[in-house]
Image (cartoon, rainbow, N blue to C red):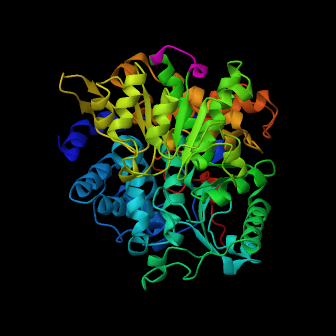
């Protein structure tokens, strides 16, 4: 593989010369929202001076400060006598990046950059999103969460504990920014496929919100990561003297619910009812009931349920252009019956209803397998979510048997059981179907139900594959090559967030996520499908997010759920006006002179 740094050097000016994928933004629209670019809006005032400037990641430009700025801001002498453009700074970071041997070291380098120089961090990330997304988010973020206690450098979010109940409103005042428009919150109980990581789960909200900005253009100052620490049931962490969270078993029941209630009220009291609250990596026992409790009261969604559903259905809709039939012609078997499976199944049913399929008939096309086997009506003690998809069928214990009996056209893995799609299952799928749909969506990579190579090899290149974590290109013995599609939620939540924030949506319906899925599928070209891709390349994710945001805004005004009025005539220009730019601002003081006669000094 060609050196990343060498490739970057050769392409640096070509790549960085574009504005990271978004259409250009008029100076008037940026200035009106305070999202200034130096070349457009000119001077940005700040009252900070001296050392505080170099320690503020929102303001710090490192050696990109001009001499005039250094003198006026009182930082001359605090920086080396060198003046660099942002492009050269990017190259310097990348040279340092290449010296890091492990992904965790690369993650720490990038997070340290974010702590030091925010605009440079986002310039780097937006210019090379395909290379850096696996580091700042899945799969590396899972490792980073496991090591979060050792990797912690400085505050990147707000830790709220069960002992702070009754005082959350006061705690929110600790955060330095007041104009918060988006919050990602977790209680750390179900981090990716890794389980209960307690306070180490903070890495997830931090990573998600970095993608809000990098992929969606949401201003980082408007984002707040939150970790609700109610303890952990992870015995290894409880016995670890270096663990940085509360060292007791998880608090559950009434006290837990009261904490969540207080959190929701405190956030909306301080930041307004339009503040977007994204729930992330809550356990199944809490995720569904929290979503159902708050979805019609607050501006909120659960990415594990609704975001995963949207990106999975987008992949399925793209796959239909390969299989040349309708969604209702397919039968789905799920490995797993948790948040992701339920979310995907419900959105598939919504999409089938748009085809005119009755609900009862659509449900019959969804088969779910959990740890006890096929979910059937005769099984007792089913929760409400599973009961909806219980089939009238004798009990079946294993996934292999279910696949043999049901003969599905698509299997979807969302149970974080690595290798669950065995060789027999994949070969059976290939024997039933000319082009079997095989989605191994569990994260991180070690939890994937099968690899891309296994799918393409065992189906002789006929399999339609997507995964949750990235896989390399696969070349078969006959010379055919396939680029596996990654069903990354990052295709969904940044664009949805940008659209929701822009027009002030109060409640986020599932229709928005189906609209998003359709928008993503529309961005997949015939060339992409020929390569094996079910999603547009990650390099285009900012353009995709922009188009999703426009569709969300159009949907919001069409269905009277927006709160920003008057309704903007040009929705694209309206969205552009909200987009964050990683270009540096100018802090040169606005100096000018009066006429000589007006400045004449009066003397005795």
**What is the residue that sits farthest to the front in this orientation?**
394
Q: Quadrant of the C terminus?
A: bottom right
Question: Which residue is nearer to you in this view: 71 or 149?
Answer: 149
Residue at 58% x, 22% y is 327
Q: Residue furthest bottom?
A: 241
- Which residues are the magenta region? 323-329
Residue 9 located left or right of residue 391: left
Report how many numbered discs are placed on residues in the image: 0
Q: Is residue 351 magenta?
A: no
- Please say whether residue 202 is visible from this viewpoint: yes
- Residue 100 position, x and y percent, is 24, 60
Q: Quadrant of residue 390?
A: top right
Q: Position of residue 92 (x, y in %)?
A: 26, 54
**Residue 487 x %, y %:** 46, 38
Relative to 4, does residue 76 appear above or below in the rendering? below
Residue 528 is situated, as x and y percent measured from the top left of the image, at: 39, 23
**In front of the other: 429 or 603:** 429
Q: At 64% from the left edge and 34% from the top edge, which residue is drawn?
A: 347
Residue at the location (49% across, 30% down)? Answer: 410
């Amino acid at each position: 593989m060609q050196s990343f740094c060498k490739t970057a050097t050769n392409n640096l000016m070509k790549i960085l010369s574009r504005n990271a994928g978004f259409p250009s933004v008029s100076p008037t629209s940026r200035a009106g929202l305070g999202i200034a670019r130096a070349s457009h809006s000119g001077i940005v005032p700040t009252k900070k001076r001296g050392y505080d400037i170099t320690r503020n990641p929102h303001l710090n430009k490192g050696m990109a400060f001009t001499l005039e700025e250094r003198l006026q801001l009182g930082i001359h002498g605090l920086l080396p006598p060198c003046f660099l453009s942002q492009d050269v700074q990017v190259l310097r970071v990348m040279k340092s990046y290449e010296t890091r041997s492990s992904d965790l070291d690369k993650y720490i380098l990038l997070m340290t950059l974010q702590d030091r120089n925010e605009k440079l961090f986002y310039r780097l990330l937006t210019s090379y999103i395909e290379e850096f997304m696996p580091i700042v988010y899945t799969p590396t973020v899972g490792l980073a969460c496991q090591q979060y206690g050792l990797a912690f450098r400085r505050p990147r979010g707000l830790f709220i504990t069960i002992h702070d109940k009754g005082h959350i409103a006061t705690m929110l005042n600790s955060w330095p920014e007041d104009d918060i428009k988006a919050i990602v919150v977790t209680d750390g109980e179900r981090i990716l496929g890794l389980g209960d990581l307690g306070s180490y789960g903070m890495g997830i909200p931090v990573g998600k919100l970095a993608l809000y900005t990098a992929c969606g253009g949401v201003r980082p100052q408007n984002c707040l990561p939150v970790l609700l620490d109610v303890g952990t049931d992870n015995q290894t962490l409880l016995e670890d003297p270096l663990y940085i969270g509360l060292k007791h078993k998880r608090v559950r029941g009434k006290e837990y619910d009261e904490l969540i209630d207080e959190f929701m009220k405190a956030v909306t009291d301080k930041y307004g009812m339009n503040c977007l609250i994204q729930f992330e990596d809550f356990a199944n026992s809490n995720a569904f009931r929290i979503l159902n409790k708050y979805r019609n009261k607050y501006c909120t969604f659960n990415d594990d349920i609704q975001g995963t559903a949207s990106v999975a259905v987008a992949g399925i809709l793209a796959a239909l252009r390969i299989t040349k039939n309708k969604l209702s012609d397919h039968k789905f078997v799920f490995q797993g019956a948790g948040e992701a499976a339920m979310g995907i199944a419900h959105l598939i049913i919504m999409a089938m209803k748009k085809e005119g399929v009755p609900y009862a008939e659509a449900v019959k096309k969804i088969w779910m397998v959990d740890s006890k086997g096929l979910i059937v009506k005769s099984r007792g003690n089913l929760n409400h979510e599973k009961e909806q998809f219980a089939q009238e069928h004798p009990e079946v214990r294993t996934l292999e048997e279910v696949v043999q009996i049901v003969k599905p056209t698509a299997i979807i893995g969302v149970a974080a059981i690595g290798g669950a799609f065995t060789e027999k299952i994949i070969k059976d799928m290939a024997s039933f179907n000319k082009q079997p749909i095989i989605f191994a969506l569990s994260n991180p990579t070690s939890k994937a139900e099968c690899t891309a190579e296994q799918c393409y090899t065992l189906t002789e290149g006929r399999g339609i594959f997507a995964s949750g974590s990235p896989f390399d290109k696969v070349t078969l013995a006959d010379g055919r090559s396939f680029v596996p599609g990654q069903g990354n939620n990052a295709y969904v939540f940044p664009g949805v967030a940008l659209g929701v924030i822009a027009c002030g949506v109060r409640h986020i319906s599932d229709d928005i996520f189906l609209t998003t899925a359709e928008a993503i599928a529309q961005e997949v070209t015939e060339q992409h499908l020929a390569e094996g891709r079910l999603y547009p390349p990650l390099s285009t994710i900012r353009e995709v997010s922009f188009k999703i945001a426009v569709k969300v805004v159009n949907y919001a005004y069409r269905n009277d759920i927006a709160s920003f009025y008057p309704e903007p005539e040009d929705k694209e220009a309206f969205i552009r006006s909200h987009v964050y730019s990683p270009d540096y601002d100018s802090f040169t003081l606005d100096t000018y002179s009066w006429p000589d006669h007006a400045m004449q000094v009066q003397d005795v």
